[in-house]
Amino acid sequence: MYKNYYKSLIFILVSLFIAQDTHPYPPLYLVTVPTSGTLPKGTYSMEGLLVDDGGILSRLSIGISDNLTLGFSWGVQNLIGDTRPSMTKSYPDYHFKYRIWNEDFSKPAIVFGFDSQGRGKFTKIDISSINDEPFYRYNQKSLGYYISMSKNYQALGGNLGIHIGINKTLEVEDGDNDFNLFLGIDKEINRSISLMIEYDAMLNDNNNEYDYEDLSLGKGIGYVNAGLRWSISDNLLLELNFNDINRNQKISETAHREFKILYSQKF
């Protein structure tokens, strides 16, 4: 029994490292951090991210030009399981990014973008000590407006991408409206497998003056996230992501395990 198990495990590992399919388009995001990648003109991508409580976060992105990508996203809670499914919000979120500078030998690529999609539940908060009116926010705030810079290098037998940026969320009703910083790297293991590590400082979600019972605000240490990306073919990517490894969210007992399927194609 164990002999067959080990044979299967070895076969899977060898298959992963032998696979040499390269995805032709740059990644738009690492785990949550945006890169300077945009979709080529006339290209679209669709992705489904399996998240906590049997939920799914879907995203559609379209390359309007080589430098401009537009799209929208929507989430469904409890899609898998025995609880009645519900939309995360009654309307979709949207995103765009415009590359204002292309990468060259000495300079990084730079994009300006916006993304209103957060992570986790979109929860109603009614705390009179902060705001006379109730407000809504994601457990993990959306990026809002951002600037991201990316630079790629050849290192240790594969591509090494370095990404850094700043963002300003529109979810500021909790009184925490600071600018935020993020950074990340992605490193090719071989032509089809990449490792991603990132840090989101969440400077706009570290106000510990208030303690919400039903909302997991940050503890002030930021989010450490990591993931493994596998390019199965020219059109299909799979990702296994670990969000909040350091348990920044107040109610997190362990990292949020997420699985993503991404399909891209030309029109």
Image (cartoon, rainbow, N blue to C red):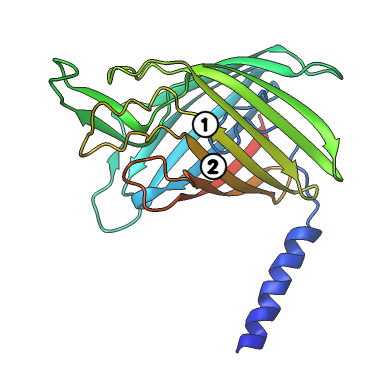
Q: Is residue 267 above or below residue 22?
A: above
Q: Position of residue 149 (x, y in %)?
A: 67, 20
The image quadrant of residue 187 is top right
Report the label total.
2
Q: Residue at x 77, y 37 (%)?
A: 160
Q: Quadrant of the N terminus?
A: bottom right
Q: Which residue is mark 1?
A: 200
Residue 10 position in % (x across, y down): 72, 73
Q: Is residue 184 visible?
A: yes
Residue 32 coordinates in the image, percent (x, y): 53, 34
Q: Position of residue 154 (x, y in %)?
A: 85, 36
Amino acid type of disc 2? Asn
Q: CA distance from mark 2 to mark 1?
A: 8 Å
The label on residue 225 is 2
Q: Residue furthest top?
A: 100
Q: Amino acid at mark 1?
A: Asp
Residue placed furthest toward the bottom:
1
- Residue drawn at x 62%, y 30% is 28
Sort mark 1 into few (<14), some (14-19) or many (20+) by Cα contacts within 10 Å.
many
> Is the Cβ of the residue at disc 2 closer than 8 Å to that at disc 1?
yes
153 relative to 174 in the view: left or right: right
The quadrant of the image that shows the C terminus is top right
- Is 12 drawn above or below residue 21 in the view shown? below
Relative horizontal placement of residue 233, taking residue 239 as reference (left or right): right
Camera-nearest residue between 39 and 179: 179
Residue 66 visible in the snapshot: no
Instruction: Tell which of 96 and 5 is nearer to you.
Output: 5
Tell me the crowding category of disc 2: few under 14, some 14 to 19, or many 20 or more residues within 10 angstroms, Cα based. many
Q: Residue at x 33, y 34 (%)?
A: 217
Residue at 64% across, 16% down: 111
**Residue 161 falls in which quadrant of the image?**
top right
Choose the circle earlier in sequence order: 2 or 1.
1
